[in-house]
Image (cartoon, grey):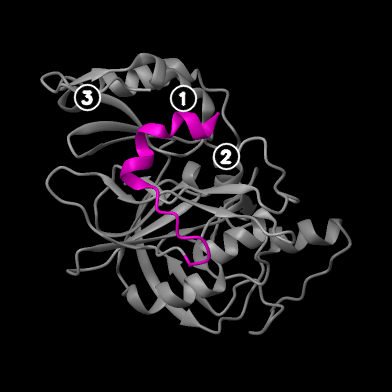
Amino acid sequence: MIRKRQSSLVGLFVALLSGSVLATDYPLPGGGEHLVGSLRTVEAQFEDTFETLGERHGFGHLELLAANPGIDPWLPGAGSEIVLPGLHVLPEAPREGIVVNLPEYRLYYFAQDDGEVVTYPVGIGREGWSSPIGETRVARKQANPSWYPPESVRKEHAEEGDFLPAVVPPGPDNPMGPYKMNLALSGYVIHGTNKNFGIGMRVSHGCFRLRNDDISALFPQVPVGARVTIVNQPYKLGIHQGELYLEVHTPLDEDGRPSSLDRQAAIQALLESKPELTDRFRLDWRQIRDTVYAEEGIPQRIGTPFKAQAAPLR
């Protein structure tokens, strides 16, 4: 059960702050530290769904689903304890500008010179419309954008009996939302939405979709020319207070679909490729195995220093 396997983290990271909104601005860790945020739990009310809880607390649908196995996302039930997976190992990428980790369905923004990172759930490209991987930049920004649906998108909608106009003006029917940031990759945009369902899922035509409150907060912070790094990292290693943590998400293939990757072989290769980390720690292979196959998106402690007299990992 997830509650038992989190016991080593509870004393460090869980803040029981039910009723308050989860902060997403975190001090940027230094000194070889890689984790930000905290785990929280909230008690679901009768009318709650994962969609409403995600909107209220700053999470996407799939990350809540992964962190709460066995709970009905459409009817969690009054009094159900819901884990909010707000503890993150920072992606392995430059701590500069925007970083999007596709399997995590999450965007990080490293603001210039203020020592903070802010993170938001994000919708990414669905099957057949995969989001790109690599480095680019913000080419231009626009408030109250019109939407010019590409011919391929208009054709797809027409086949379903939904005939799109050549231009959708700003307003509540515009899927761009109130703001957009065009990337220096033709056709790819970070933008808001007129449909909150789908945040933290594979739903878009390759663009990156944020809730309108989130894009409204992010848009004024990001300058034109800001660096954008898009990665595919289902497995993230990080150090916190001298111990090694592993965060695991369901791997996606290059088309954005859940991957048939040999997970144990992949994590073995990752650990072997990071001797600067793993050579310093006594690894708990049972915890590694459980974390890899659970794919709950919650960092778990998998290693303690060889010289430390630490309590047994569990």
Q: Mark 2 = which residue?
A: 66
Ranked by sequence position, the earlier of labels 2 and 1 is 2
Q: With 301 as the anchor, is 276 left or right in this view?
A: left
Ranked by sequence position, the earlier of labels 3 and 2 is 2
Q: Tell me how far mark 2 sits from mark 1, CA to CA.
A: 12 Å
- Eyeballing the image, is 58 above or below 275? below
Instruction: Name the disc covering residue 76, or none.
Output: none
Q: With 164 as the anchor, is 217 left or right in this view?
A: left
Indicate the position of residue 46 as horizontal and vertical percent values. 74, 59
Marks 3 and 1 close (CB-CB < 8 Å): no
Q: With 195 as the anchor, is 273 left or right in this view?
A: left
Q: Amino acid at mark 3?
A: Thr
Q: Tell me how far mark 3 sits from mark 2, CA to CA.
A: 26 Å
| Residue 153 picture quarter | bottom right
Q: Mark 1 = which residue?
A: 292
Q: Amino acid at mark 1?
A: Val
Q: Mark 3 = which residue?
A: 304
Between 173 and 90, the residue placed more toward the observer is 90
Q: Amino acid at mark 2?
A: Ala
| Residue 277 picture quarter | top left
Identify the residue shown where x is 33% and y is 75%: 221
